[in-house]
Image (cartoon, grey):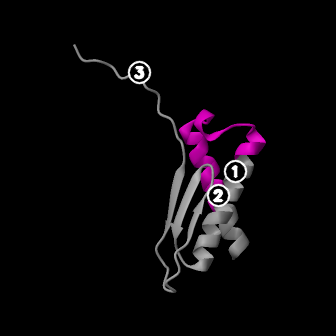
Amino acid sequence: MAHKNNKQEELVGFVGVGLDNEDGHTRVTKSEYFVLVGGSSDTHEQMQDTAIYFNEALDKKGKRLPETETHEAIELLRDAIERSRRRTQ
């Protein structure tokens, strides 16, 4: 008889990686739910904005990331990315 795994999935954070760095600077930002690495100054800033907007949206819902359903967290992240893109355009 196969054993079932009763563990529920838990989303604990996101990793953002920027690949367009050509100036030699090492950029790393850590927050409660994000680790952001690399990227040009502009790209890294956009990733930081995304993290801030995501955290603001999560705070509005009165939740912490581990309490949030994965699909809801992904939707919040998509919204934060779009908001960050609009700000930098």
Residue under the point 51% across and 35% down:
10
The Cα–Cα distance between marks 2 and 3, rounded to whole angstroms, is: 31 Å
Q: Label 1: which residue?
A: 55
The Cα–Cα distance between marks 1 and 2, rounded to whole angstroms, is: 6 Å
Q: Position of residue 62 (x, y in %)?
A: 75, 37
Circle 1/circle 2 CB separation < 8 Å? yes
Q: Is residue 10 left or right of residue 89?
A: left
Circle 2/circle 3 CB separation < 8 Å? no
Q: What's the amino acid at mark 1?
A: Asn
| Quadrant housing residue 36 | bottom right
The Cα–Cα distance between marks 3 and 1, rounded to whole angstroms, is: 29 Å
Magenta highlight on residue 65: yes
Q: Which residue in the rendered view is the most extreme toward the right?
A: 60
Quarter of the picture holding the N terminus: top left
Q: Is residue 19 above or below residue 29?
A: below
The number of discs equals 3
Q: Label 2: which residue?
A: 51
- The numbered mark, 2 or 3, whose residue comes first in the sequence reads 3
Q: Label 3: which residue?
A: 6
Q: What's the amino acid at mark 2?
A: Ala
* Prevailing secondary structure of the magenta residues: helix
Q: Which residues are magenta?
A: 58-81
